[in-house]
Image (cartoon, grey):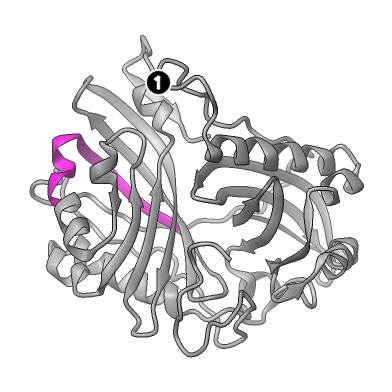
Amino acid sequence: TGRGSRTGRGSRTGRGSRTVKSQKFHENRSIRISTSITNQIRLSVTSSSSTSPTSIIMSATTAPQLNTAATKQPTLQQSNIARVQALVAEFQAGRPEGYLAGVHENIHGSVLGGLIPGGDDYRGKAAFQELMGSMDQYMEVSKFEPKNWRAVNNDVLFNVDWAFVWIPTGKLIETTALVRKVVRDGMICEKYHCICDVEAITGEPSPHDATPVERVQELLAEYGAGRPEGYLAGVSDDFSGSVLQGWVPDEMARFNSKEDFGKLMGEMEQYMEVTKFEPCNFVAMPNNDMMFNVNWCFTYKSTGKVVETTAVVRKVLDKDNNLCEKYHMVDADCVLEESPRDVVAAAH
């Protein structure tokens, strides 16, 4: 069931939801790191919300462009992004049956957990279809805008910007969701679609365990205070994943141990000079998973280009509350592509 299937806190046999205490990201929290990775990285964690009306937007952004100079055939990850985008387009065009044609019979996960009854732990295509059919009882949607498409292994990860009227209160909500879809043989086998700050919408805690978010924020605070050893103390010996893959060498970006990851942290300054590293949009997910975004601004040293972009990050805790997996994905093309401009805005 993908990379997040390790035994986590308590029992993690399967991909079902863990209905325990919720998390709520503390607004206006700030962590500062200096502007150079050699000394410190400037890090600020902020969150904001808006409730101004917005017109209907139901459009998916395109996937990162293929680097045809490097490869003639799309990778598995590029193909998976294209597949998910095509299915989302079917749904947005008013053809839910077209979307459901790409859903596996044994799909499971969490969709709008805490908002739609049963959404935090659904199992099977029929249950998923019923869940989606009940959404209009709770939400009157005016905006559903996918963006920040990333992929690693069998996972497709992205954001969705939402605007909707929450029918139980009549309140207009504008928020962001983090989404993870696991694709195998062109079929969506797992789907996790978690909206930020459920409690602010419903008045009730999120059904998912807040521990992964709280632990990641603790470790980021260590790193932000100039204590990388404090961050590494929360990393398992068999830590695995990838960071900034596609524009730093693969042998560095991919790691399979704590030692490898430590080397990566020490070598990043060879490739980038960071002026902004801003984590935001933290969400807890089932299976000891969590996701968030990072807003970056850095100079890519190989070209001198200043890059502004948004990363999508997924981290997984093990049973000892240590990080055992990490995927930190930035659109490589926005870093590598040629541009006459000094600043490349590539948040989408």
Q: Which one is nearer the viewer's eye here, 49 or 129?
A: 129
List the residue tagged with mark 1: 70
Percent x, y for residue 120? 69, 75
Total labels drawn: 1
126 vs 287: above or below: above
Dividing the picture into quadrants, the one containing residue 18 is bottom right
Q: What secondary structure is the stretch in magenta mostly built from?
A: strand
Amino acid bearing label 1: Ala
Asked if one can make out residue 179 in the rendered structure from this viewpoint, the answer is yes
154 vs 3: above or below: above
Quarter of the image with the N terminus is bottom right
State the residue at coordinates (58%, 63%): 196
Dividing the picture into quadrants, the one containing residue 204 is bottom right
Is 53 on the left-hand or right-hand side of 271?
A: right
Percent x, y for residue 156? 57, 48
Magenta stretch? 266-280
Q: Residues within 10 Å of mark 1 (few under 14, many from 20)?
A: few
Q: Which one is nearer the viewer's eye here, 230 or 128?
A: 128
**Residue 271: in magenta span:** yes
State the residue at coordinates (13%, 61%): 226
State the residue at coordinates (74%, 45%): 143
Is 255 on the left-hand or right-hand side of 36?
A: right
Is 116 on the left-hand or right-hand side of 220?
A: right
**Residue 155: in magenta span:** no
Dividing the picture into quadrants, the one containing residue 21 is bottom right
Mark 1 element type: loop
Q: Which one is nearer the viewer's eye here, 72 or 120?
A: 72
Asked if one can make out residue 177 in the rendered structure from this viewpoint, the answer is no
Percent x, y for residue 207? 63, 81
